[in-house]
Image: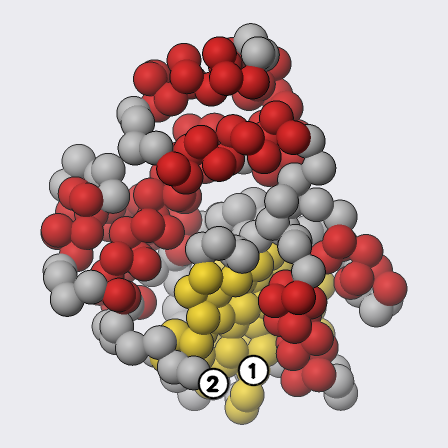
Amino acid sequence: MEIHDFDIKKGIYSFEFGELNTESHSHPVVEIISATNGTFSLQSNGQINKNLVFAIIDSNIEHKVFSKDCSIRMLMIESHNLKLTDFLGNKGIKFKNGVFSKTNIVNKNELFSEVKNLAITIDLKTPTDKRIVESIKFIEENELEYKDLISELTSKVFLSNSRLSHLFKEHIGISIKKYLVWNRLRQAINLYLSKNTNLTDVSIQSGFFDQAHFTNSFKTVLGVSPSKAYNSRILQS
């Protein structure tokens, strides 16, 4: 696997795989998959779409990806406002049960690049509600366990636990607890890529109980084990 981008601040993550076979998983990012040669299969909503060359999976949609003798490019984008949705809509892209997939698409390389450039040049990550923006900023800047985190957040944004939880899920698509895991995963991966250290150390540094806790969370969110996915610390330019 080659890692081209891992930008937590902007919420842009891009990779290349020789092949990819995942377990069922979901994550709070929009995922774009483009085959550079061969085809792949995508399972979601109880259906399997085969012989695909291009797919977009909306955030928090459970899915599996299967590829054999197929090199793919993958782009993950944190999208918490309507800018990416509007862009895709203007391109005529409509999701069916959270998925857009094609067995043949002429402009897939152009579309992949356009979406990536959009994410680079425009803020797709920041939600429209300032209270959620403040909550995310606090989560990302503080290492707190869930119970302490909720207590701090509710007093900070002047909302009850239930109201904050509802508002957070409305804007981000997942609970605060799940976002806390996502944030720890990003931090752990970023540490692993940038520091000369091992998975055990980065998992502890990022707030996981141990490497097993980190590995299980990683597979639940990203569909593969961390040792299989991140076998290189080199970010390609």
Quadrant of the image occupied by residue 158 = top right
Label 1 sits on a secondary structure element that is strand
Q: Quadrant of the C terminus?
A: bottom left
Q: Which mark is residue 70?
A: 2
The amino acid type found where label 2 is placed reads Cys
Is the residue marked by circle 2 packed among few (<14), some (14-19), or many (20+) residues within 10 Å?
Answer: some
Q: Which mark is residue 196?
A: none
Q: Which mark is residue 35?
A: 1
Quadrant of the image occupied by residue 189 = bottom left
Is the residue marked by circle 1 packed among few (<14), some (14-19), or many (20+) residues within 10 Å?
Answer: many
How far apart marks 1 and 2 lie (CA) works out to: 7 Å
**Quick check: marks 1 and 2 in contact, CB under 8 Å?**
yes
Counting the numbered discs, the total is 2
**Picture layout, residue 218 above or below residue 56:** above
Q: Nearer the viewer, residue 231 or 12?
A: 12
- As drawn, the residue found furthest toward the bottom would be 37
Q: Position of residue 194 (x, y in %)?
A: 26, 65
Q: Earlier in the sequence, mark 1 or mark 2?
A: 1
